[in-house]
Every structure is written in C-alpha cells, then in structure tokens.
Image (tube, rainbow, N blue to C red):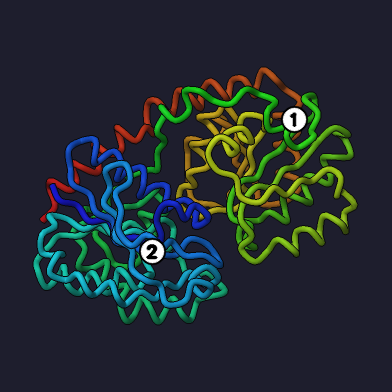
Amino acid sequence: MKILQVIPYFVPAWDYGGPLRVCYDLSKQLVRRGHEVTVYTTDALNATDRIKQREEVTDGIRIKRFRNMSNAFAYKHNIFLSTSMLLPVKELRSFDVVHMHEYGTLQNVLIRHYVKKYGIPYVVQAHGDLPRVVAKQGLKKLYDSLWGYKLLRDASKVIALNETEAEQYKGMGLREDKIEVVPNGVDLSEFENLPRRGEFRRKHGLDNSCKLILYLGRIHETKGIDLLVKAFAGLSKHFADGNLVIVGPDDGYLLVLKALVRELKIEEKVLFTGSLYGEEKLAAYVDADVFVTPSFLGFPVTFVESCACGTPIVTTLRGDNLGWIHDQVGYVVAYDENSIEDALTRILNDADLAGQFQEKGRKLLSEQFTWSKITEQVEHMYLNLR
C-alpha cells in the first residue's frame, strides 16, 4: 500500500512529544512490512529552529516538509500555518490511505478537502487532542464547528488511544463501529541493551544509594508537575536522600516550577536537565526508582518506555482510563499531593513490590504493547477501509 501520514512535526523535532514518536514508530514498522510510507509535515524543529532539509528518506520513510509560517507561534500555541501543503495536490491521488495525526490542525483541514474530492479513505488519530481545554475553549469550539466535526464525520475510521478517548469520539457524534481502539506501543529492540544503572547518577552527581523520582515530558502547566514538586517536598522530610529529576523542554512553565522549588526550599534536591534523547533518556529511566506523570491525556509513550526500562509508575485519576497501570505496574491515585506522596512512599519503601511492578510491566509490554502487534492491527484496519 501507498500510505500518507500527516502530522505537523516529525523527526528530529522530538521536543513536540508523543504523537511524533507514535507516527515515527508506526511508519517504520509499516515500511518493514513492505508498505510505501510518505510523511507530510512542516519544517518546525523547536521553539526557535527549523529543519532545513525539505525532502529526505529516514528509515525508509519518505519525508516532505513544508514551510511553517511562524515557528515560534507553532511551538507556543501548537498552531502550524503551512499553506504550502496545498502544492502537491496531484500527488495525493496516488495514495491508498491517508492517516492524519492530531485533531485540531490546519494540515488536516487542507488534506481532508482533497482526499475527500479524490475519494481516498482517511483515518484520524487525535492523540488526546479532542477535549476543549480551559485556555483555548473558544478557539477549539470554533475549530469544531467550522472543520472538526466534518473531519471526523468524513473519516473512514478514527483511532482512540483508550476507552476514555473512544467515549469522547462518541460524544462528538461518531458511531461505535467507526472507532478503533489502538494503544501506543514500544519497539522492544530499542531496549535490549539499556545503559548500566548508575550512568545518569554519575553524570549528574547523584549518589547511587539515593531515591530518585523522575518526571519526563513537556514542562507545561497542564501536566501537574507543581503537584509532584509539592508531594516531593513532603516526601523529602522522610527520605533525606531523595532526589527529584525533571526532564523535558520548557513549554512555558519552567520559571514557575523553579520559583516553587525555591519557595519550598528544596533546590538542592531537584534537578532540571532540559530535554534528553536516546541513551541519555534511557539512562534517566534506568536510574529512576519511580516514574511520575501527575496529569495526562491519551496514552503517554513515556508510560511504556518506563515499563521497558523496569521503572514503576505513579499517575493520578486526572488522566484517561488506562486500566493496565494500577496495581500492575504502579499506582493510579487521587489528584492531590498527599496521595502522590503516599504512592511514592509505598514503592520506595518496598523493593519487593517495585520488583513485582517491574516484572509485570515487561510482561505486559511483550503481550499487548509491542509495535509489531499494534502495526498489524493498524494494517488490518487500513486494508478494510471503505
């Protein structure tokens, strides 16, 4: 099959997070299964830089980048203005299926118009982008009424990351038979030769015996990292050797967090590393005693990455329903600092419990969340579109 993936950002723009990782891993697997995969994206790299290469082939994936009119605007507001994506309309006719990633994007609006005109089936994968968050409710409502409902209505299938997102699609008027639940996954081959435990700690001057708590993701106010910092401040009164490591790009909230850390007088126990990739990111997972994401939408790739590195998870009820986490690979608790602190304490105080979570996590990955299995499901869906 000739498959087109449409996403506002693509490798190596890793700062943009999970949807990029999903699109990349899925595309790699589809290429390995003999399909011809093209990605339409923009030249956005991060808040300040662009990717100069307009066309290239990476891991067998053909990438076509279109100029984004305002890079800073894209990074800050997640609005990508790339009207030049209209240029290759003739090429669109050659694709057998189009897979659109994220929901509220200009790219989806432009591409939908032409694939509908040419009768090409398409799939929409929202990646947790359906809810109207408080800060952008008006803009999201306008997008929904002008383009969003049409985008979903005309799609052959929509992909939900979990049952919570499936219900959100139904709330927007979609029939159940149009919704395919497909979780995010992991390529276990990338975790076969993990860094040795202690490498991350040595690099950052952390003692091998200390209790290390890790957050990894965008530093944004919606992620609940402030709650984690407060929970850690309470925890550190009982764990004198505890350290909190916050990894990820600043998405407008870093200065607020640093001010909170100073206010709580825990500066010496909290490390901000910025973004980490590749071996450095894996080393952070391996050296962590527990991984924490207080608030999320969709299905964070960081959850399966953490399990692949043998690190237990703590998250909260302020997230979509992922029933495989609680009491299996970690804890899902109430969204308050005392509940987070209690869950962290239980894991840090019980090595046997942490070991059980580690063992169950790796078993779950191999049974449910490998990219080979997920890609087989997506491929079957593509072949049966109408």
How many other residues sit within 10 Å of disc 1, few (<14), some (14-19) or many (≥20)?
few
User: CA–CA distance between discs 2 and 1?
Assistant: 37 Å
Per the image, label 1 sits on a secondary structure element best described as helix
Q: Callout 2: helix, strand or loop?
A: loop
Disc 2 target residue: 8
Labels 2, 1: front one: 1
**Quarter where residue 187 is shown:** top left
The circle on residue 202 is: 1
Type of the residue with mark 2 = Pro
User: Left or right: 81 with respect to 34?
Assistant: right
Is 139 situated left or right of 36 in this image?
Answer: right
Using the image as rendered, state which of residue 256 and residue 146 is in the foreground.
256
Q: Residue 198 sits in which quadrant?
A: top right
What residue is rendered at 33% in x and 46% in y? 58
Q: Residues within 10 Å of mark 2 (few under 14, many from 20)?
A: many
Considering only vertical position in the picture, is 37 above or below 263?
Answer: above
Q: Does residue 379 appear to the left or right of 217 in the view shown? A: left
Work out whether 112 lies above or below 3: below
The answer, for residue 2, to whether it is visible in the render is yes
Place of residue 120 in the rendered image (x, y in percent of width and height, measured from the top left): 12, 62
Q: Amino acid at mark 1?
A: Arg
